[in-house]
Amino acid sequence: MLAAPKLRLITLSENTAKWLWLWGEWGLSILVEADGFKLLFDTGLGSSTVHNADALGVDLTAVDKIALSHGHVDHTGGLREVLERMRLTVGRSNFLTKRRREEIEIIAHPEVWGPKFINHPGDPGYDFRGIPFRKVELEERQGARFVESREPVWITDDIVWSGEIPMLNDYEKIVDTCYLKEGEGKYVDGDAKFIPDPINDDAAIYIKTELGLVIVLGCAHHGTINTIHHAQKITGMDEVHMIVGGTHLVKASDYQMESTISELKKIGVHKVGVSHCTGLESSVKLAIGLGMDVFFFNNAGNVITLR
Ligand SMILES: [Fe+2]
Ligand SMILES: [Fe+2]
């Protein structure tokens, strides 16, 4: 189990930024540093992850692995740029020794590659929201090596990527705006068929520490509480110290908000750091419901060190 001071979480990309020299960009990317191991969880939407890493003095070439929370573009659009940067490993003596990393491992669910689209009520059509790169291109040009799994993947003795998260309660539901496209028709004029996306690829990171579990959420499409219970099950730890990241409470009903707050209290989560798809209104409700000794905002530039 990880000693508390050996864990650091640095949010590299989020909808909002903590400092004026950082970029806010809709999406999420969080660097997990645990006892010398560096895992990048998601890569943000565009250039903000690399820009903010540079501005914060975070060396992306030292990142060991990447893990993805799901295939939506706001978590994967920065992939190519991040990989390009991670491969620029410069030798100690001078630029002549500059060499490229052969490959970079990326842990993800096989359905991250699904034809993911979005449609809000009243939208005239469906817009693509999946990974904006071809897998073969990332593998051949950027050195990506995808490790695809539906089951949990242990990354170190203390860090596990969740795999599929079962949906077990009656108040956490998949949003009704996410679709998968079936067939080859033109999606703009309704020739193609769109079916609701179960977002089976939704995943999180669980870290075992001496203070309890630290859970890093991407978008929590399968529900924050479902994600916590899954973490407890696969790690065998009941104590939850912190959850941090996107909770997808942005359009939560009163019933979902009340149930979530009451379950977070029942579990006894010490700290709740919300980002991204939590939404401002739901953030306020969580802050009031949980109290400011538990609640905090987690945006780009935020550095969390456990004590
Ligand atoms: Fe998402
Ligand atoms: Fe998202």
Image (cartoon, rainbow, N blue to C red):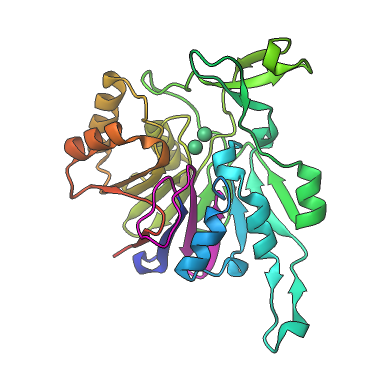
Q: Residue at x 69, y 27 (%)?
A: 115
Q: Which image quarter is the C terminus in?
A: bottom left
Please indicate whether residue 225 sits to the left or right of residue 158 in the image: left
Q: Residue at x 23, y 33 (%)?
A: 285
Magenta stretch: give its range. 14-42
Across and down, in percent, residue 89 comes to 69, 73
Please indicate whether residue 288 sits to the left or right of residue 98 in the image: left
Quadrant position of residue 148: top right
Please indicate whether residue 65 sits to the left or right of residue 32 in the image: right
Quadrant position of residue 101: bottom right
57 over 164 or under it: above or below: below
Quadrant position of residue 39: bottom right
Q: Residue 26: say if magenta.
A: yes
Depth check: 135 or 109 in front? 135
Across and down, in percent, residue 251 comes to 36, 24
Please indicate whether residue 102 sits to the left or right of residue 166 in the image: right
307 over 277 or under it: above or below: below
Depth check: 263 or 202 in front? 202
